[in-house]
Image (spheres, coloured by chain):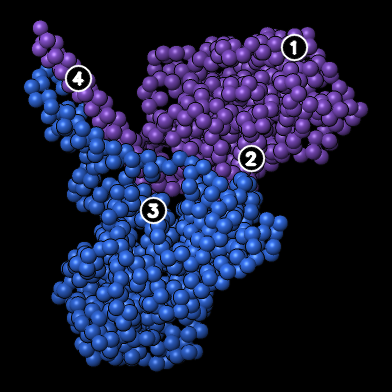
Chain colours: A purple, B blue
Amino acid sequence: MEFAELIKTPRADNVMLHRPFHPAVEGTLCLTGHHLIFSSRRQDNAEELWLLHSNIDSIEKRFVGSLGTIIIKCKDLRIIQLDIPGMEECLNIASSIEALSTLDSVTLMYPFFYRPMFEVLEDGWSSFLLEQEFELLSSVTNEWRLSCVNKEFSVCPSYPPVVIVPKCVDDEALRKVALFRHGGRFPVLSYYHKKNGMAMMRSSQPLTGTNGRRCKEDEKLINATLRSGRRGFVIDTRPLNVAQQARAKGGGFEQEVHYPQWRRIHKYIERFNILQESFIKLVEACNDQSHNMDRWLSKLEASNWLTHIKELLTAACLAAQCIDREGASVLVHGSEGTDSTLQVTSLAQIILDPRCRTIRGFEALVVREWLQAGHPFQQRCAQSAYSNSKQKWEAPVFLLFLECVWQIHRQFPCSFEFNEQFLIMLFEHAYASQFGTFLGNNENERAKLKLPQKTMSLWSWVNRPEELSRFQNPLYEANSLVIWPSVAPQSLQLWEGVFLRWNRPSRFLEEAEEERINIIKYNKELQAKVNALRRQLAEMEADEETQEEP
Amino acid sequence: FHPVLLLQVENVKLLDRYANRKAATGTLYLTATHLIYVDASAEVRKETWILHHHISSVEKLPLTTAGYPLLIHCKNFHVAHFVIGQERDCHDVFTSLLKLSQPVKPEELYAFSYNPKMSKENREMGWKLIDLKLDYQRMGIPNDYWEITDINKDYEVCSTYPPEIVVPRAATKAVVMGSSRFRSRGRIPVLSYLYKENNAALCRCSQPLAGFSARCLEDEQMLQAIREANPGSPFMYVVDTRPKLNAMANRAAGKGYENEDNYENIRFKFIGIENIHVMRSSLQKLLEVCEMKSPSMSDFLTGLENSGWLRHIKAVMDAGVFLAKAVREERASVLVHCSDGWDRTAQVCSLAGLLLDPFYRTFKGFMVLIEKEWIAMGHKFSHRCGHLDGDPKEVSPVFTQFVECVWQLMQQFPCSFEFNERFLLEIHDHVYSCQFGNFLGTCHKEREELRIFEKTHSLWPFLLQRKQELRNPLYRGFTAYKELQPNTLPFSFQFWCGMYNRFDKGMHPKQCVLDQLLSCMSQKVTLEDNASELENKLPFLDGPVPSEGCSSPKAEAAAAKAPTPPQDFGQGAAPVLSNGPSLG
């Protein structure tokens, strides 16, 4: 397909661009296959806006006489307005944007066309391999092994080709366990707590059905993570009644009789459409410029967004507590094991593992626990909070995870190597990107699309020193401790950096951040200078001594 | 410590409100001024001090298996839940605290016995630290239009105003006296702040005794004099900060508001800030929400909404913004009042000053602002804070709301205040502590009668001594920002956990950016000293200087300012700080 067919009016002049807190700008609008480009014609202070079509969540058009107005709502939650003279031009542009922002073929997406302007220092597609992860693990324990049972994606289509499993369980057993777990998602290692050798596993629900089917290999697999005489915890992210109802559809949960060493805890986490609705309501509340405090607070409450945040953090703390405080191994799952399960396991690692609080470590976590673990990004992030179409697979699952990280970050501002901008950047790229990283729903799809060969990885770009410097937290001091966040409502805040970002000017907050960076940077320079002077003085004194001695 | 010990009780438990940690066990002491609890179960000696004056209520709760519970609520929002083994002990503590926390006579207040071992000269110097005359001079007063007059030296004009007030030159003594008879409690229109750039003035007073039809020529002349003191503007605003309904109800009692027909060229406007009773019950509801045991998010947000607290904060802020805007943008003078002109009027005038003038955002300036708009102008701290055993209906968190508005501004403009949150909390503590004389009594006349200037200490020098820990490391200096134009959309207001859940440490961020930056600031001084000392030891150094970026001490002095660079932003006129649209 040629994009040109979709673009009837590639260019319009005398277009007015309106954005909140910016003066309106007049300029020229151009449409390309993947971008909407606006550039002001002012010579003195030329302004350009490049918007990926895939970032456009919805568009509305209005006419007053022959002046058309297009309101574009983006997946990063920004709203812009374009006034386009000429009804035909406006209609053409609107329909082009509509078509180009809803391309149904992945291979037409921008990442397949994007050619980077930077030199690739490190190919992000191979920056985070599970083999490297396993090597680290092998240096502290030999109870685990890498299994290639899924190398053809035949045992579990949503798992990566290699997974880490208990050493004592062979591939044959894994195949049997896969048949006993929803979507073939057999229990695999998610995190190993070096401090006490406890493990966190994740999977999907067991297919016990109504007649209480069991699978000896499944029992053996998860029991292999237990120390003798110790119990483990199954954290089921569904409420008990939902887990019970799942049996009628062939699903189910681990029953005490067959898993006597495991204690099951149901910690309910909302899913899919409920989260999406909540997201839509919250964004609506944030964009409502009514001056009424009561209305704002009641809309914020009714969105339930912060409730989800609190529940999610509570569940993650619970998992972390089982491992660190109780010294027990943990298995986490919900139904499919691709959403709430990953939220819990990845957040628990943020709490437990200082490595996950570094930039590289966090990237590795996102790769391991989200991308390779088969969170269906393409489905979940197809639309954001402004979509009118009721598609049932969208859900801000990853955004909720990022916000929870932000909440913990806010409570431990010196424990993270990255800053808020880093999290916001990941949110943006999950929804629309020039990079191939978040395309596809799992490794299987990514392999079929040949993403590593045909597209650029987000990590190739982010990990370049000049980009990294934008994402560094000046206050960071490596902290090897477990960090327990408070989940009291008073301790949680709306993530303004995402939800109010376009609704309030950020100048004064940016200046504050600049100031913080300056203070710390200057101190570091001073310290370096003092150290250098000391060294020099010591050398001089040493020289003098040697001169005096003979 | 060797204070006089009144009572000592062993085996007292102190419960943690949130964490399910084991309760502390220790000893409770009562001294003449404090309740002191020493935790014996902790590895390091841990003490909890509660000033008797800070206690707002003491309750005996029903007996539990652990013993006799005693619940103490403090005015600085500290809540302490003790459990005492013996009923007798519990009762003794209870009755002692009731007595100690509610003194009857002013002489019993802490300030009259507080002895920081300071020389008489220094104590007197302390009281002279803040000179309001200097502040008026800063505004250019006296000038052609305004004068400082001692017409109230015998409190003949108004018993709750200070002896010296600022009125238009054009207002004769007869006008002043006449106007005072027409204003509730004689609180005539006086100047609060003069915006030098355009001569627009912010003035304050109490409600007129207008009833349904009464008028007063002198009062009308007074307003005319104020309007004409700003020749650039053809009109002036008269702002009644009460809800219209309340103001109308007052007419029946012979009070009320200005009739636009009787005053020349005024624009009259209501701004609906609720009265002290609504505010008191709103805070009560807010505190109940803050004290809930493991509330859900929904419980908390619904409770926050139902308390109405942030709605009131927004109303006060909106009013402040309106005044500042009228003065700055419309170049119009404004006369503000509420009923008596000592609560809402104090809030909005001080807030407007803070928005208009960067001086009030410095340590010294903020002290001046509080002395001027609150203390001198007769905000009844003693009644509003319940310093003495008195009418509970007079108690209201009017000053707390002002402090919170300042905090909300700090959230929006993190680099524009010289001081940090702790400075606000410190002041808030001492408004209730009665440890210093500043906030005692209800007005200047009463403070003279109490002889606080002879017998007590002023708070301000004590706070200035602690500048290092109370400063804002992000402050960009006096000239960096001029006016502040805050965003007053509802989402710009946050719940202030640091105030209302201040003593629930578990709720606060576990790592403190402020501490981190403050220690950077103090390290910086040491490092700079080290560097120059070392450089002096290397006098014959030739060859390249170490560490690029900061080369010689002289060149480095310029670099040193880079992190705290008022001069970088101070060139030319300071920009107006706008933070988005606000309610006009």
Looking at the image, do the residues carrying marks 3 and 4 touch, with CB atoms under 8 Å apart?
Answer: no
Badge 1: residue crowd in 10 Å (few <14, some 14–19, many ≥20): some
Do marks 4 and 2 both belong to one polypeptide chain?
yes
Tell if the residue under mark 1 belongs to the same chain as the one under mark 4.
yes
**Can residue B77 be seen in the rendering of this structure?**
no
Q: Nearer the viewer, mark 3 or mark 4?
A: 4
Residue B198 located left or right of residue B205: left
Subunit of mark 3?
B
Quadrant for the C terminus of chain B in the image: bottom left
Q: Earlier in the sequence, mark 1 or mark 2?
A: 1
The CA span between labels 1 and 4 is 61 Å
| Front label number (1 vs 4) | 4
Return the disc, 4 or 2, that comes first in the chain's sequence: 2
Could you tell me which secondary element the residue under label 3 belongs to? helix
For the residues beneath circles 3 and 1, the answer to whether they share a chain is: no
Q: Secondary structure at mark 2?
A: helix
Circle on res. B422: 3
| Residue to which mark 4 is pinned | A538
Which residue is label 2 attached to? A314
Task: Give the residue type that dot 1 points to.
Answer: Val
Q: Secondary structure at mark 4?
A: helix
Q: Position of residue B579 (x, y in %)?
A: 38, 52
**Amino acid at dot 2:** Thr
Real-space CA distance between mark 1 and mark 2, rounded to the nearest whole angstrom: 32 Å
**Callout 4 amino acid:** Ala
Depth check: give the residue in front, A405 or B368: B368
User: Which element carries disc 1, helix, strand or loop?
Assistant: loop
